[in-house]
Image: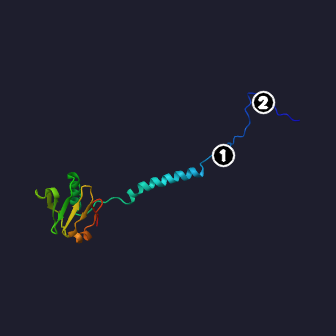
Amino acid sequence: MRCSPLRTAAQPSRRPLTRIHNARDGFTLVEVIVVLVMLVLAAALVAPAFVFPERESQSVLAPIVDGTRKLAARRAETLHLQVTSDGNWRVVGASSLAEGAIADGRLEGDYKGPAFSLVVSPIGSCGFDVASAHAARVVDIDALTCQVRSP
């Protein structure tokens, strides 16, 4: 029978210098998939801002429609924006008919569009009145946000 030599406290153990691998080294497939899904979700939230940047409308109507929308919300009143074919505009409201126009002016630049009347609600939506059916096909306005879309 062979006996192993005795070790004293001064002698270190002679283990190999290689690392002992256990089952927890690295990442599991589930962890990698979870991280990738989170990265894809973060990219999906941020990407539209870079891919589809919002552009300012180039229309001469945009500032007038936007101002009328803000005025309707501030007054808590449905307003009518009336634009003539020569570029004059005026804003009237139901409670201000006796007072006359709330605001009026002339569109900047050369307006070559049809005459129309736009009804603007205090919640920010708008639509053309019945007499302005032709203008609804020519002037591109988002009815939900009441913003003029760029041509």
x, y (%) of residue 145? 29, 59
x, y (%) of residue 134? 23, 72
The numbered disc on residue 7 is 2
Q: Is residue 133 above or below residue 38?
A: below
The residue type indicated by label 2 comes to: Arg
The numbered disc on residue 140 is none
Residue 5 vs residue 63: left or right?
right
Figure disc tally:
2
Query: Could one spot residue 80 in this view of the protein?
Result: yes
Q: Residue at x 52, y 53 (%)?
A: 36
Q: Residue at x 51, y 54 (%)?
A: 37
Mark 2 Cα shell of 10 Å, populated few (<14), some (14-19), many (≥20): few
Give the mark, 2 or 1, whose residue is nearer the N terminus: 2
Classify the position of the N terminus by image quarter. top right
Spatial CA distance of label 2 from label 1 is 32 Å
Mark 1 Cα shell of 10 Å, populated few (<14), some (14-19), many (≥20): few
Q: From this viewpoint, which residue is outermost toward the right?
A: 1
Q: Is residue 131 above or below residue 45?
A: below
> Where is residue 148, by image quadrant?
bottom left
Residue 135 vs residue 14: left or right?
left
**Could you say whether the residue bearing mark 2 is in a helix, strand or loop?**
loop
**Residue at numbered disc 1:** 23
The residue type indicated by label 1 comes to: Ala
Which of these two is toward me, 30 or 142? 142
**Could you say whether the residue bearing mark 1 is in a helix, strand or loop?**
loop
